[in-house]
């Protein structure tokens, strides 16, 4: 008697270990079975095999494989060196008939990382540290050739140049063990003098792997101090009745490192259509003065932002608000002669020039409509007393 197989119902995946390692090559066996679990020797066709853990070109997207499955008496196909997993973690492998998506099978496995094969800087490189202070931690990530974290990998940190020492353990070398995310760290350095220190991080027992190289520079406190925006004049910008605002800004570099260049100062005003005529003058090795004016100010409230950046990229910012407002013209505070003084004339004839005075309030604003009385004190024929009203701040005796 012969067993007549039924239609193919599933694909069984075998020959894969429950736990493997990224980078290992695996043999794969696929068996097509019927609904009763018997191998189907009649099946042939293409079978697509895919897994989220197979990303051969490492572009972040799984790369499926397709195998030709010939009819076989055993209903199975074994492919040598069929699969290489690249991504670590729990995963699945699925096999599906290209012609019939319902004919499929899935297997769950776990992929561990491959051997530690690269070390990359996470943080702590290119620091500037004050002499005598502790650096921020130097941290690396250790991974296999596919970028999977390799927990437990040992990393050796070595000071290869410069005066800095590690704050714990051997002053010139220290070993860290990578954590679950592959992060090995957190060594800090003590830097006793100004200058550059280099630290190399290498994977222990992984010859030929390029080290990660940190550079930490130590600078004196003075060099690290940000510039000071010493003063902005007027400090309180309550400008009245003017569209042209005189400005003076002084910026000092207390480190006196000569690191403050004229180009490192920016002055920003949030008012449109204002013309800035500020020019920067280097007053000394450690001081810059910007002088000039904002022209065409409109009435209202404005923000002025001053930014100073020294050559060590230390940055200081200061924002001030100032208001441009109209004021009411006050009472006459000042009368000054404009013309008509010092004349002489023949008795009985008029003087050739008229008497003109200018009247202004305490802000120097011309006062209109003020009554000015002109009175002769001595020797004059006429008038003894006459009045004139000011127009646009000028009163004329005619
Ligand atoms: Ca891919």
Image (cartoon, rainbow, N blue to C red):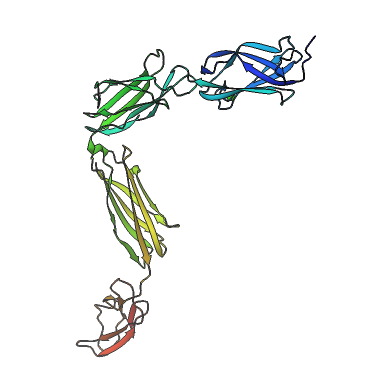
The image quadrant of residue 237 is: bottom left
**Disc count in the image?**
0
For residue 37, which quarter of the picture? top right
Residue 263: percent from left, percent from top = 35, 43
Quadrant assignment for ligand 1: top right
Counting from the top left corner in percent of width and height, residue 304 is at 36, 55
Decide which of 300, 116 is in the foreground and name it: 116
In percent of the image, x 33 and y 82: which residue is there?
A: 370
Closest to the observer, 254 or 63: 63
Left/right placement of residue 58 relative to residue 252 reads right
The residue lying furthest to the left in this view is 378
Picture quarter containing residue 214? top left
Residue drawn at (33%, 85%) of the image? 388
Task: State the residue in front, 138 or 306.
Answer: 138
- Across and down, in percent, residue 47 comes to 69, 19
Q: Name the spot of residue 236 as percent of width and height, x first.
A: 30, 61
Asked whether, in this view, residue 149 is left or right of residue 60, the answer is left
Q: Which part of the image, by quadrant, shows the N terminus?
A: top right
Q: The C terminus is located in which quarter?
A: bottom left
As drawn, 168 above or below 351: above
Note whether 378 is above or below 149 in the view shown.
Answer: below
């Amino acid at each position: 008697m012969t067993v007549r197989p039924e239609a193919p119902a599933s694909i069984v995946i075998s020959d894969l270990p429950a736990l493997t390692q990224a980078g290992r090559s695996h043999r794969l066996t696929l068996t097509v079975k019927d609904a009763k679990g018997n191998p189907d020797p009649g099946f042939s066709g293409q079978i697509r095999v895919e897994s989220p853990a197979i990303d051969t070109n490492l572009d972040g997207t799984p790369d499926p494989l397709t195998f030709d499955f010939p009819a076989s008496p055993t209903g199975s196909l074994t492919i040598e060196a069929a699969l290489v997993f690249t991504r670590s973690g729990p995963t699945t492998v699925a096999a599906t008939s290209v012609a019939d998506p319902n004919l499929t099978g899935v297997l769950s496995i776990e992929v561990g990382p491959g051997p530690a094969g690269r070390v990359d800087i996470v943080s702590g490189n290119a620091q500037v540290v004050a002499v005598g202070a502790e650096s921020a931690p130097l941290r690396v990530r250790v991974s296999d050739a596919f970028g999977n974290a390799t927990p437990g990998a040992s990393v050796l940190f070595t000071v290869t140049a410069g005066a800095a020492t590690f704050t714990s353990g051997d002053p010139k070398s220290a070993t860290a063990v990578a954590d679950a995310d592959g992060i090995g760290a957190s060594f800090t350095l003590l830097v006793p003098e100004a200058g550059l220190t280099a630290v190399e991080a290498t994977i222990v027992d992984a010859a030929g792997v390029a080290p990660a190289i940190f550079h930490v520079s130590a600078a004196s406190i003075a060099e690290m101090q940000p510039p000071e925006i010493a003063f902005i004049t007027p400090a309180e910008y309550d400008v009245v009745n003017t569209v042209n605002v005189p400005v003076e800004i002084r910026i000092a570099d207390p480190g006196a490192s000569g690191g403050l260049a004229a180009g490192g100062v920016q002055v920003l005003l949030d008012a449109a259509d204002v013309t800035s005529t500020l020019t920067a003058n280097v007053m000394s090795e450690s001081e810059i003065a910007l002088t000039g004016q904002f022209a065409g100010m409109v009435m209202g409230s404005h923000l002025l932002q001053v930014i100073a950046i020294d050559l060590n990229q230390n940055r200081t910012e200061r924002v001030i608000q100032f208001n441009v407002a109209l004021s009411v013209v006050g009472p006459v505070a000042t009368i000054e002669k404009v013309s008509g003084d010092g004349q002489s004339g023949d008795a009985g004839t008029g003087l050739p020039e008229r008497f003109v005075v200018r009247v202004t309030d305490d802000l120097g604003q011309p006062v209109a409509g003020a009554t000015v009385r002109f009175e002769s004190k001595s020797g004059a024929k006429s008038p003894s007393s006459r009045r004139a009203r000011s127009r646009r701040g000028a009163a004329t005796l005619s």
